[in-house]
Image: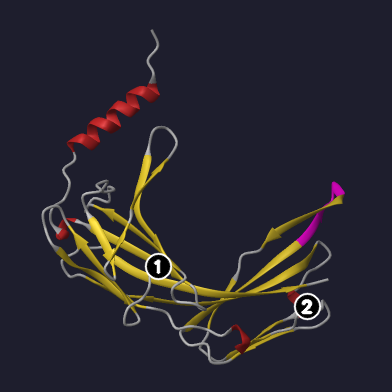
Amino acid sequence: MKSQPSLILLLLVICSCGERKQPHLLSDIRAEIGIVQSLQRKEDNEIHIDLTDKEGRAIKSDSISIYVNGSEVPFTIKKELYYTETTYYLKANARPQGNQFLFEIALPGAPKAFLAKVTALDLVDPQNISYPETGDLNKDVVVTWKDLPGIAYLFISRSVNFKKKDEPNITYSEEEAPDTVKVTSNGKYTVARSTFGNTQKQISTLSFTFVAERNGTMSAQAAKGSMIHIYGNIEQRIPFE
């Protein structure tokens, strides 16, 4: 009789998980907190939290509760392929209090304790970004901006169309790797028309993504490698005819 590898693997996973002890001290937990926030409305956000032990193994226990500004962040289980699952904490539209996100953790049989905090990102007015509505292959594209608080990076990416020699009647599209530029709240950037294409390919869309981000403060009791990070961006696109 042939063995069933998938069944054996499943049993091994179940056994190993059953033998793994759940942590009862914050010093045994590595927390990674990520927040994606809109730069036009602070309440438009999504919080994702992963908990692992010191060896990097996922902590799969709904007996550990996490709160943001007093509101619980739901424990989530996502079923994956081959009888596996991913667990994390996920919450959308958390409301900042005092312009910050404050996280607390409650371990089994223990009261809430400080876990992390981070200041919300500043809001950005898209009207403070100036750029042409459509691109011209024969002209440089100039983008200017002012009063964009907290903006630290600008990503410039190009969507291009091209054809293959052996398929001249078919047009393909691809995204080129973006350029990254450090910027401040006021500035100007020029994209030279010489980068818009050649005989093999031609630009179809030019995208500008302004990025704001910062790290926050973690509890000194959390395991090494714990972190909290908040990220937001605002994107503008320029189509080419």
Q: Could you tell me residue 72's position as x and y percent?
A: 29, 61
Most distant residue in the left direction: 109
In this view, the residue in front, 34 or 192, is: 34
Mark number, residue 134: 2
Left/right of residue 79 with respect to residue 98 in the rendered view: right
Mark number, residue 35: 1
First in sequence, mark 1 or 2: give its number: 1
Q: From the viewer's perspective, is residue 101 above or below residue 166?
A: below
Looking at the image, which residue is at 27% across and 51% down?
56
C-alpha distance separating marks 1 and 2: 33 Å
Image quadrant containing the N terminus? top left
**How many marks do you count on the picture?**
2
Judged by its main secondary structure, the magenta piece is strand
| Mark 1: few/some/many CA within 10 Å (<14, 14-19, 20+) | many
In this view, the residue in front, 226 or 130, is: 130
Q: Could you tell me residue 199's position as x and y percent?
A: 84, 65
Left/right of residue 61 with respect to residue 3 in the rendered view: left
Amino acid type, mark 2:
Thr
Q: Would residue 239 be seen by someone viewing this image from the given angle?
A: yes
In this view, the residue in front, 139 or 43, is: 43
Amino acid type, mark 1:
Ile
> Based on the displayed image, in which of its 4 quarters is residue 162 positioned?
bottom right
